[in-house]
Image: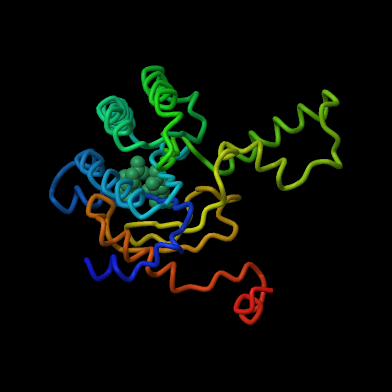
């Protein structure tokens, strides 16, 4: 593990890592337990990932915690996830302060239960001046819903003569997404062996490097994050250019 840490180039750490935390249900089932047991055991993985990312100098970490599609799960499971969210945010606030973590949320958070909105807003407000890392939770998040929402808001401005159609460009669209204050994703990690995006950050991942691992989310630890970052550092991001152009910095 120490050796792995030493091989990480601290000058080339991804600025923004996004994580699809998947496999809680299967992890619990594998232990003969209920799915909710897996969600409860996901917290250590979240904490360890955030701490490690922060120590390595990652500035933005975005965690997919609940999708717009996850509302279709059994009510019992949705309720358990919501109460877990509330208790965790309450409990972790002093730790966020101590670790200089700025908490942020993306998604249709207005659809969360009122008590969850309340603690979430409180944690966001209390941590807003923290600097070390921005930890964003995607809650009731769906990339398509986000884009629809952005189109509606831009259209309103056009109709009200606050914006000209010709002025609409990528930057304007960016500014109307839930992620308006976040940079593009550099590295996306998905656990549990599924090779799909599941409606996460479609616009923001246009040029992200994608990393998939079979590890189930509750088992995800420091060393797994090191592996993902090392893999990322061994890739060449070309953004449409040729390898030669990248080498000569053209
Ligand atoms: C990810 O784990 C957590 C959420 C989607 C909230 P899952 O609950 O999807 O676990 P699997 O994929 O069923 O194993
Ligand atoms: C994606 O996981 C959403 C979260 C991790 C919060 P899912 O388990 O909901 O994704 P699918 O349904 O397998 O694509
Ligand atoms: Mg899943």
Residue at point 34% right, 62% down? 193
Image check: 215 left or right of 140? left
| 157 lies above or below 185 | above
Q: Farthest bottom residue?
A: 244
112 vs 160, nearest the viewer:
160
Residue at point 85% right, 26% down? 161
| 248 lies above or below 36 | below
Q: How is the image coloured?
A: rainbow
| 134 lies above or below 30 | above
Quadrant location of the N terminus in the rendered image: bottom left
Q: Farthest left residue?
A: 32
Residue at point 64% right, 73% down? 249
221 vs 197, nearest the viewer:
221
Residue 29 image position (x, y, % from top left) = 19, 49
113 vs 123, nearest the viewer:
123
Residue 49 image position (x, y, % from top left) = 31, 50
Quadrant location of the C terminus in the rendered image: bottom right
Image check: 30 left or right of 61? left
Tally the marks: 0
201 vs 233, nearest the viewer:
233
Q: Quadrant of residue 30?
A: bottom left
């Amino acid at each position: 593990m120490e050796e792995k840490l030493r091989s990480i180039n601290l000058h080339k750490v991804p600025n923004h890592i996004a994580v699809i935390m998947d496999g809680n249900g299967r992890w619990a089932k594998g232990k003969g337990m209920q799915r909710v047991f897996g969600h409860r055991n996901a917290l250590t993985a979240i904490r360890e990932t955030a701490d490690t990312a922060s120590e390595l100098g990652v500035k933005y970490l975005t965690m997919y915690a609940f999708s717009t599609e996850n509302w279709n799960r059994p009510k019992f499971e949705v309720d358990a996830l919501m109460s877990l969210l509330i208790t965790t945010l309450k409990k972790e606030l002093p730790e966020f302060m101590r670790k200089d973590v700025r908490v942020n949320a993306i998604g249709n958070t207005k659809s969360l239960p009122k008590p969850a909105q309340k603690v979430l807003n409180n944690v966001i407000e209390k941590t807003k001046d923290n600097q070390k890392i921005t930890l964003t939770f995607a809650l009731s998040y769906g990339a398509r819903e986000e884009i629809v929402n952005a189109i509606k808001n831009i259209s309103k401005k056009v109709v009200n003569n606050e914006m000209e159609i010709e002025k609409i460009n990528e930057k304007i669209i960016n500014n109307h997404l839930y992620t308006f204050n976040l940079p593009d994703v550099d590295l996306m990690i998905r656990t549990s062996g599924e090779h799909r995006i599941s409606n996460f950050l479609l616009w923001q991942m246009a040029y992200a490097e994608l990393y998939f691992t079979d590890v189930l989310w509750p088992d995800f630890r420091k060393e797994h994050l090191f592996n993902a970052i090392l893999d990322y550092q061994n890739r060449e991001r070309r953004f449409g250019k040729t390898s030669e152009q990248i080498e000569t910095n053209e």
